[in-house]
Structure formats: C-alpha cells, structure tokens
Amino acid sequence: DLTNPIILGDAELAYEGALRPQSLAEFVGQEKVRGQLQLLLTAATMQQRTPDHILLAGPPGLGKTTLAMIVAYEGSRPLRMSSGPAIQHAGDLAAVLSSLMPGEVLFIDEIHRMARSAEEMLYLAMEDFRIDIMVGKGAGATSVPLELAPFTLVGATTRAGLLPNPLRDRFGFTAHLEFYAEHELEQVLTRAAPLLGLSIEKRALAEIAGRSRGTPRIANRLLRRVRDYALVHGGEANLEAVHAALELYDVDPIGLDRLDREVMKIILTRFGGGPVGLNTLAVSVGEEAETVEAVVEPFLVRIGFLTRTPRGRVATPSAWSHFGLSHPQAGLT
Ligand code: ADP
C-alpha cells in the first residue's frame, strides 16, 4: 500500500541505510574529522583496547550516525543504538549499559536530550566502566556498584554547546562536522545514483548538489524525488527533471527550504533586518528555539545571510538582495 505513510517512511529509511558508507575510506569529505578518527581508531587497535569516547557535533544529516556505524565496522565491534529522548530515567541507561558486550560501541543520538539523572550515571560509566545502582527505598536504600564491560560511547548532538561541561570533558575527542562543499555532495550523489538504480546526467547531479543545503541527507533525498519525477513522467533523469522536481518541492535555487525562507523573511520584514532575539524569532515562526538555532541558523550563517550578534540575529546585505528587498535605511547611509 503505497499510500500508507508509515510504509513509505520505512522505505525512505531503508534507502538511507543502503546509501550509508561502511568505511572511513568510502566516507566523502570531512577530511579533518576522518584523519582524527583514523588516528584514534588505529592507536586503539595497536594497543588492543577500546577506542576513547567520541562526541560528534553538527547539524542533522551531515553523517553523525554513519560515522558511529563506521567506528563499529572498522573495529569489527558490535553496535548498540539509542537516543537521548529514549533515556528519560537513570534506570533506562542502566539497562542499556549493563547489557553491553565487551568492546561494544554505544551510539547515543541527541545525547543533549538525555535526562539529568542519567547523565550523572554516564559520567562514572565513561570514566571507570562502572555504575552505582540504588537498591531499596528510603532509609534502607543502598547503592551497589556494578562493573561494566569496556565500551566506546559515541555521542551525537546538533550543538556541543548544549552539553554540560562535565559530560563534554569526558569525551576523548569532539568532532565538529562541517557543511559539505558542492563537489563533495556531487561525489555523494555519484555514489548514490547507481545504488538507487538510476542513470542520471552529470550536470543534473551538479544541480542537485548545489541545492542540497550542504547536507548529504538532503542531497540523497532530492535525488530520490528526481528519480520519482523521471519515473512518473516516463522521461530521463536530466536537468529539466531536476528543475521541475525541485520546484514542485519548494527548494529554491540556492537550496533554501520553506523554514529557512520563513526565518529570513520574518527578520527582514517584521524586524527590519534585526537585531532580533532567538526566542522572539522562534515564536514568530512557530518553531522551538533549539530547532531554529541548531538546524536553521547554521546554514544561513554559513552562506552569509545571517550574523549572530550579542544583541540578536541580524540579516546581511546579501540576504536583503536575495529576497529582492531593499534595506529600509539604505537611502540614508
Ligand atoms: P546524521 O546522523 O548527522 O543526522 P546520517 O549519518 O544519518 O546523518 O546521514 C544521513 C544520510 O546521508 C545517510 O544516508 C548517509 O548515507 C548520507 N551521508 C552522510 N554523510 C555522508 C558522507 N560523508 N558520505 C556519503 N554519504 C553520507
């Protein structure tokens, strides 16, 4: 039943899985981070120990989950996947930690959203591979230490700054993932197209790469929409199909999506270009402040449309001209 959104969602997830590189060598771009990870993993292998804990920071879709899987594959280690929102009590974390196999890689996505009580348990677990379990209630309660198998924690967060310092300090290394250059996204797409059974012109791939917001997940997703378009219209996956499909899905010529545009337009039209505070901005677009800050803003900053100042967010002259508006005070200066 192709109209069932749940089944469609699963199909998209399955594609995403099929497109994931399985080794550092296959992982496109992020030169710096790849070098850092390679060194850390090789040293651990030479010393026959579990690699240090790793924190991966960066906007969604840049490859954090993929890198966690690669850390496991490259060391032939089992992988356990969890996420901050799934760990709402220390007990949830104790259950995961106490069932880890020796050398297992534990991936916790959105680790900044884990419950505070679990965070404290995690400090001890990361440092000493040990946790204290509370047994009983009230005056008779005692804490019983429990030894854990040595493991490697790979945490992912949209912003390292969202983590409390004591947690951040317990990672051996923090990798900051950057948005991808267009030629790197082209490489991602060139690899993905045959995996989707799609033959597509090189200039069509370049066009998709230029509209992918510097993000491999978005590039892969747009590629699938272009494939759909070519399939339904019985045509080739060429530049025309790219233009038509991306117009249908509201992706503008530089890759901005609906929310990106809405944030910029509100700053420009309702707040005269800023400065406007994050919370005011978030309320105006009906999103959580964390989403605006960690998902929307980094790309707008990266393309030079937005600056973050102590007094708030300010639109740049290139943002005014991209949206075809003139700065209200332009004539005065
Ligand atoms: P995150 O966990 O940061 O949100 P993912 O690791 O889930 O991102 O990556 C999203 C998609 O993008 C996956 O399908 C993955 O295959 C692809 N991808 C991400 N980074 C790369 C890369 N460097 N090279 C190739 N594909 C990538």
Image: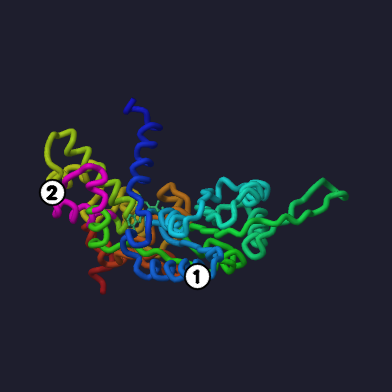
Which one is nearer the viewer's eye here, 84 or 266?
84
Query: Which residues are drawn in magenta?
Result: 191-212
> To which residue does mark 2 refer?
239
Residue drawn at 35 percent across, 58 percent down:
267
Which residue is under mark 1?
A: 46
- SS for tag 2? helix
Residue 174 drawn at (x, y percent): 49, 67
Q: Position of residue 278 (x, y in %)?
A: 45, 59
Instruction: Residue 200: say if magenta.
Output: yes
Question: Which type of secondary structure does the marked residue at label 1 adopt?
Answer: helix
Residue at the farthest right position = 139
Q: Please tell me how crowded label 1 is: few (under 14), some (14-19), or many (20+) other residues with Cα within 10 Å.
A: few
Q: Is residue 314 magenta?
A: no
Q: Residue at x 30, y 66 (%)?
A: 304
Q: Is residue 323 visible?
A: no
Q: Which label sits in the foreground, 2 or 1?
A: 1
